[in-house]
Image (tube, rainbow, N blue to C red):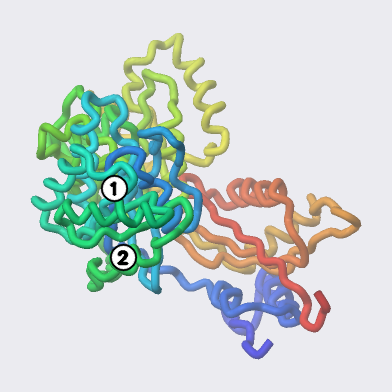
Amino acid sequence: MTDELPAPHESDAPETLDEIREAALRAGLEDYDLSPEDLADLVGEPEPLTEEALPVLAIVGRPNVGKSTLVNRIIGKRLAVVEDTPGVTRDRVAYRAEWAGRDFTLLDTGGWEKNVTGIDLSVAQAAEAAIDMADAIVFVVDAMVGATATDEQVVRLLRKADKPVVLAANKVDGPQGELEAAALWNLGLGEPIAVSALHGRGTGDLLDAAMAVLPTEMHEIEVDEDAPRRIALVGRPNVGKSSLLNKLAGTERVVVNELAGTTRDPVDEQVEYGGRTWTLVDTAGIRRRVHMTKGADFYASLRTQTAIERAEVALVLLDASTPLTDQDLRVVQQVVDAGRAMIFVFNKWDLVGEDERFLLERSIEKDMVQHSWVPRVNLSATTGWHTNRLLPALELALSSWDQRISTGRLNSFLGELVAEHPHPVRSGKQPKILFATQAATRPPRFVIFTSGFLDPQYRRFIERRLRENFGFEGTPIQISVRVREKRGRKK
């Protein structure tokens, strides 16, 4: 190993028992092969909070033309739901993708026509939302069926938007398909690029064409550390996000309607709350076009994801008067995946009867057993009851999100933990924890160097004990285990 181990953050001369332990363990690492990534993590410098401004490429088209199959082909993973049935795309709509060294955001608009009247209308609604968000469009048409009336309607939207469009003639698997694809010149969108999303044919040419029209002047914006902390209000439709924003702001800043999904665009609001300024991102916002009412699901899902990624802490609103849904749990997982601090806000708690509250508490504990580290506030956004309890929960979650444990304390903690509860012996071998460090905050990210694989159960055990000893209430914890061989050892 040519690179030297980085020195500890504290004084070079160890003084405390923790520092002596750290110095000894760090010296022992010199016998192991460490990568440049390992060395960087050992430094443990704080990572700046940034907002990514990636170009957005939207996949648009009528149902069952292969949009989700094309999305999976582009991102190289089977993440979008694919079935041979129109309208099966339900959950995530935005993916980070890369082609020819360029990163971009890919939007999948499939499936948002469920539960609306008239498939043509619903396709147009989803397409309009995607076009509004995107920097460039890939318009997918089934070459074997040809252009339909629905396709023609989307073409009119594309022309009106005046954004770059790449025409993908999908399901082309042979010479006959090439002829059918050529007929799509009549749409007036330029050359149809013949592709087979299922088999991968032509997708490289399609992406080359898309990259040629996507803007290149995109960059990361570093968030000012001294700026007001950013809070995202997230949750499924009609749980009271806009009502809570209005209550915290003290004014009617956003439209509130009993109809679920009346908020369309995100609105960043500077509010004074608890003697300090906060930036509230309501994922939600004000609807600007009434005819988008039934097509708002696509837009709302994308806005929720974007708001979470731009925030520091998420208030996940849940309706206490109704059982938890899969949609609620998906929003929670979005926050965890994004690594943001989180608070559960059970709204409409005043609508729950005294006799029902005990059963509701038991139900919540059961459904949220994997998220027992998340602070919970029961309130009423409409009346303002218990909204004052949000401030201490916010401060607790953000302080946990920012918290850093010194390397000495961390390794002393792990040393005692392993002595008390050693890792089980597997196949005659027992992995040894060599060294651990907190590589980052926001969220807290720990790297544990070991001589062998750690069971998932033991990793979860370490996480539970980390929370018991150091708090971390309201923040996800990321733990990565690096198995490293001694230098010179044959593999």
Q: Is residue 367 left or right of residue 256?
A: right
339 lies above or below 42:
above
Other-residue count near label 1 (Cα within 10 Å), few / some / many at <14 / 14–19 / ≥20: many
291 lies above or below 407:
above
Other-residue count near label 2 (Cα within 10 Å), few / some / many at <14 / 14–19 / ≥20: few
Image x and y of residue 13, in percent: 64, 83
Q: Is residue 267 left or right of residue 391?
A: left
Q: Nearer the viewer, residue 257 or 251?
A: 257
- Rendered residue at 39%/66% (across/down): 204
- Rendered residue at 71%/67% (across/down): 483
Q: Nearer the viewer, residue 212 or 153?
A: 153
Q: CA distance from mark 1 to mark 2?
A: 46 Å
Amino acid type of the residue that numbered disc 2 sits on in the rendered structure: Glu
- Rendered residue at 44%/25% (across/down): 324
Image x and y of residue 283, in percent: 26, 42
Q: Secondary structure at mark 2?
A: loop
Amino acid type of the residue that numbered disc 1 sits on in the rendered structure: Val
Question: Which dot, 1 or 2, sits closer to the camera?
Answer: 1
Give the number of the disc on residue 225.
2
- Rendered residue at 80%/83% (across/down): 488
Q: Nearer the viewer, residue 365 or 379?
A: 365
Is residue 125 something that shows in the picture?
no
Q: Nearer the viewer, residue 232 or 126?
A: 126
Q: Is residue 279 left or right of residue 254?
A: right
Report the residue marked by disc 1: 141
Residue at the top extreme? 355
